[in-house]
Amino acid sequence: MNREEALELLKTSEEIVSAADVEASIRRMAGEIKETMGERFPLLLSVMGGAAVFTGMLLPHLDFPLEFDYVHLTRYRNTTKGGEMHWRVAPAESVKDRIVLVIDDILDEGQTMAAIRDRIISMGAKEFRSAVLCEKTIPQAKPLRPDFCGFEVPDRYVFGCGMDVKGYWRNLPTIRALTVPR
């Protein structure tokens, strides 16, 4: 893909969540997380690379002691269809006996977050929680629901705020949806 093709993707999309609404939602979520976990010294794990932007926006609002690390489990590899899961960075042993909050950009079908949950629980975590910027509304049942969620989004390909479309546009402050087939 080249610059012009990336610009065409942006042009053939529509904004579904404004930057102001993203900011307000992140502040709300931070308050909910603080209320639930603020006294418990949690370990926060960001799912790279999609959650990098969302995590960077959320962390400054979490004004309580916590530890931070990351995991990297991917299904998309710069495509718009999920495929086989591939661990690039698995959870560290530091999850044992901890309350773990996993932060991700989107809960689509829930397979990635469920795999992360299963791995963390099998490693001896005391408790697993999840926070996502978006949860996609789909007709199929999901293996889990997020504990903290910014927005429900339609069953379309969404990007921005860390989510990419074919490897591009993670840097947008808004959430957009493709208007053309993937």
Image (tube, rainbow, N blue to C red):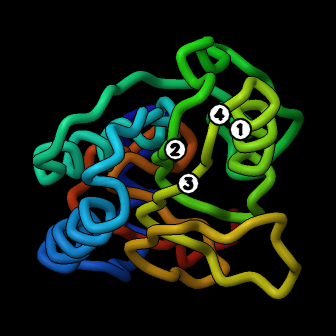
Q: Earlier in the sequence, mark 4 or mark 2?
A: 2
Label 4 Cα crowd, 10 Å radius (few <14 / some 14-19 / many 20+): some
Q: Earlier in the sequence, mark 3 or mark 2?
A: 2
Rounded to the nearest angstrom, the CA distance separating label 1 from label 4 is 12 Å
Please identify the quarter of the rendering in which residue 43 is found: top left
Helix, strand or loop under label 3: strand
Marks counted in the figure total 4
Q: Is residue 151 above or below residue 113?
A: below
With 28 as the anchor, is 103 left or right in this view? right
Foreground disc of the pair 1, 4: 4
Foreground disc of the pair 4, 2: 4
- Amino acid at circle 1: Ile
Rounded to the nearest angstrom, the CA distance separating label 1 from label 3 is 11 Å
Do labels 1 and 3 touch, CB within 8 Å?
A: no
Q: Earlier in the sequence, mark 1 or mark 2?
A: 2
Q: Earlier in the sequence, mark 1 or mark 4?
A: 1
With 117 as the anchor, is 107 left or right in this view? left
Do labels 1 and 2 touch, CB within 8 Å?
A: yes
With 173 as the anchor, is 96 left or right in this view? right
Point 20% across, 36% down: residue: 65
Foreground disc of the pair 1, 3: 3
Q: Earlier in the sequence, mark 1 or mark 3?
A: 1
Q: Which residue is mark 1?
A: 116
Q: Which residue is mark 4?
A: 125
Do labels 4 and 2 touch, CB within 8 Å?
A: no
Please identify the quarter of the rendering in which residue 123 is found: top right
- Amino acid at circle 3: Arg
Label 3 Cα crowd, 10 Å radius (few <14 / some 14-19 / many 20+): some
Q: Which mark identifies residue 129?
A: 3
Horizontal and vertical percent for residue 26?
Answer: 24, 66
Q: Which residue is mark 2?
A: 102
